[in-house]
Structures are given as structure tokens and as C-alpha cells.
Amino acid sequence: MVTTNGTTTNGLSNGHGNGSSNGFYQQAKCRLNIIIVGAGIAGLALAGVLGNSGHTVTVLEAAPAIGEVGAGINASPNLTRLLSRWGLDKWVRKHTDVLTRIDLRRWENGEFLGAATLMPEIEHRHGAPQYVIHRADLHKALWEEASTVANIRVNSMVLQIDFERPCVTLQDGTIIDADVIIGADGMKSTCRKLMYQKLGLVDKARPTGDAAFRAMIPLDTVTDPELRKFMTEPIATRWMGPDRHVQGYPIRHGNLYNMVLVHPDTGISVESWNAHASKQEILDHFGNWESTRLRKLVELIPDENVMKWQLCDHENLPTWIMGKMVLMGDASQAIEDAGVLGVAINHIFAREEIPIMLKAYELARKSRAEQVAGNGNATRTVLHFPDGPEQVERDEKFRAVAKGGENPDLLGDTKAQALLWGYDPEKEFLKKFDELMQKARDSNIETVRVMDL
């Protein structure tokens, strides 16, 4: 908990005007000049939080323009509770679809194994909704909010960073100073690369052995009435088979059917959101899978609408901080990062506190982000069992889920969901604020001692 003027508070606005002038955000205690590198979901979310709190925020995006990139996103309660708290529902919720369950099916014949319930049970259990949304729609909503309180610059590629000054140098030679620099530039992060270079390390992507296709099918191209009904039901479907799985669900109010098809990496995919593939590549991996629905869906995928990317891990950095620059994560963890980093920066009373507060943020976030990333790999292993004893045992567990049995898919297991989705990163940070600040001060003292040796 945080004590201010003798009053103990959780430090968060309740959405009724107690947090800042606009009712949703804390007021900055020391207004800072902040650079955010990257105008993705993480960078824009944080820009909105910090800009609405009174900081001067500049977002630097390398791309010359922002296009419609990506596909469906599963927005779980640990993300949606923050978007709601920040007052973003007015931008976001009009684009969302709410799913009632995930159906689990066998790969070769579509045999129904069981189902995991989603909404409204998820909201009752975790206090925030779960929904799906096209990544471009979420990005646009965050852009619309952030652009009202931050300077967003496209075609602004960062080439160099002075971590101590701090400042960035752009490709055109422009130098921009700041009090804090935040790296939110995604999987091929320039900020992360420059930090690695400073540490004398090399940032290497480690292939997991899997890759994925992403595709979307427009409903207006489908004439089969049974298939149209299947595509528009508020249900996610997961087909599981040897070394592979497929997940599909409707987005944009049923007008698109979003598909992710995970398969063994053949070495031709790259770690990128916008590498193109062909429908034939999908058929090479999934052509003998269930013919009633899945094969028909694959046949309907527009050739120009197939993307592929290599699933990679990156080694855990020894630190997320260098001087007055700090890194954020990716995907839903990046929204959690934005929440904690926003609260941390808003609790800086003087610029001299910046290094300590950034360390407190790292202490709060780094281990959780790394743990959650590891859980994703474990889930994929379970879904990809080859046909045999382990697969049979797994499928029996799936059949028992409806009766309260343990779900072998961690994302469907109630205990795992409580850890992932019941978590409120802002409240957890404030609850442990004093402890984190003391650890950060101790760490800073130890760093100074080492540098003096």
C-alpha cells in the first residue's frame, strides 16, 4: 500500500474522478519527458496511461505508416480489467466478440472430447471479462486514445540510444532527449539489441521447433449453411493432433473466422508477424485432418490471407534496465507491464528517483513475465502428444473437464487461470510497493559498490 499525506490508499483511480482530471488516471507527481520506442499495443497502451497522467510523451515508430497487421487476439481478464480501468471500453468493446466456451476435438475425425467454459463464468470468477478482438481493432482503439495525449511519430527509426543522458538518435540524425526511455518495440526490438550490445551479449532467437500459420476467412465467401452456422457461433474450437493443433473462433461480430494452425517448423518460417505463406503449405500439414469442418475451412482461406511465423524463445535478459531506459514485454504481458510501469512512473516525486523506481518495476514484473512465457511452451507440448497412451490419458481428462476434472490444457485449468487471469498487476505492485522500493534501493547500493571496486 502507498501512504500519501497520511492517508493509506491503493493508489488507483476508481473511475469516478478520484485519480486525475479525466477520472481514470493517476496524476503524475513529477511530470516527466518520456520517449516510448514502438507504437504497438504495448507502447500505445502505456502512452495513453502516461499522457493522461500529465507526462509529456513521444512515441517513436519505425514504420512509415500503421497498417492493419495481425489477426485475432484472445483478451483475457488480466488484460481487460486494465483496459476497463483506464477508461478504454468506449474505444474497445464495440469491436469485441464474447465466446461462451472452447470445444476440444480430435484431429482426424473431429470427435468431441469436451469443452471448457468461458463467458460469463470467467467474468464471475475473475472479476473481468474475456473476449476476442482483431489485433488491428485493438491497436486502432489504443491509437485513438493515445493520440489525444501523446505525440506519435511514424517513420522514426531509432538507431542509437544514450542510456545515461538519456536520448535517442533517429535514422535521419535527429537527437531527442528525455527523462526516461521505454523500449516497447516488439520481437525484433532495437532497444533490446542495443542493451545486449552494451552488456557484451548477443540476442539470439531460439526456435522452439514449432511454427504457425494465421489466416482469416470472410463470412461472405461461405455459402454452406452448416459451415456458416459453425463459424458464427460464439465458440472457439481446438483440434489437437500429433505435433500440431488448430484453434479457430469468430471475430468482428462473426464476419471473420480467425484461425491459428501450429505445426512443426520446417525451417522456412521467420520470426515475423507479416511473412506470407500459401494455402498449399497449410494443406501440406493439415490436408488429412478432419474433413467435416476443418478441411472445408482450410479450402476457403484466401490465398493472399495466409501469414506464417516461427515460434521462438529469447534468452532471459539479466536486467530490463540500463541507465534510464527500461524494456517492456510482448502480448498480454506487455499490457500488465504497461499497468505497473505507469503506476511506478506516476509515483516518482523527483527525477533522482527514476533509477530506483525503474528497478522496482523490474522486480515486480520480470519473474512473472518469464514464468508465463514458460507456461505457453508447456501447454503446447500437451496439445501435441502423438497418438498413443499419453494422448489417450489426456483425452480422458478432457472428457472429465465438464464434471469438474483437471484440464490438461493450462489455459483451461481453473488453478492456472487464477494465477494468470485473477492477477491484478497494478494492485499487486501497490500492495508490495514499500517492499519493492526497499529492495530496489538495496540493489542500487550494491550496484554502486560493485562499480566502485
Image (cartoon, rainbow, N blue to C red):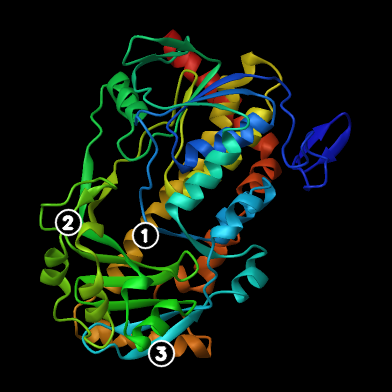
Find residue 238 and report its image quarter.
bottom left
Question: As shown in the figure, which amino acid type bears the numbered disc 2?
Answer: Ala
Name the residue carrying label 3.
399
Q: CA distance from mark 3 to mark 2?
A: 35 Å
Q: Mark 2 sits on what residue?
A: 277
Amino acid at the residue labelled 1: Gly
Residue 263 x/y as whole percent: 20, 65
Q: Is the residue marked by circle 1 packed among few (<14), some (14-19), or many (20+) residues within 10 Å?
A: few
10 Å neighbourhood of mark 2: few (<14), some, or many (≥20)? many
* Cα distance between the residues tagged 2 and 1: 24 Å
Element on which disc 2 rests: loop
Label 2–label 1 contact, CB within 8 A: no
**What element does badge 1 sit on?**
helix
Asked whether 436 or 388 is in front, the reply is 388
- Count residues near mark 3 (Cα–Cα under 10 Å), then give few for <14, some for 14-19, many for 20+: some
- The residue under the point 15% across, 60% down is 278
* Residue at 67 percent of width and 64 percent of height: 127
Q: Position of residue 436 (x, y in %)?
A: 62, 35
Q: Is residue 368 visible?
A: no
Q: Point out the image quarter for the C terminus.
A: top left
Q: Secondary structure at mark 3?
A: helix
Q: In front: 48, or 203?
A: 48
Residue that badge 1 annotates:
376
Residue 26: mark in rendering: none
Q: Position of residue 58 (x, y in %)?
A: 52, 23
Q: CA distance from mark 3 to mark 1?
A: 22 Å
Rendered view: 11 above or below 169 = below
The answer to whether residue 168 is visible is yes
As displayed, is residue 125 above or below residue 307? below
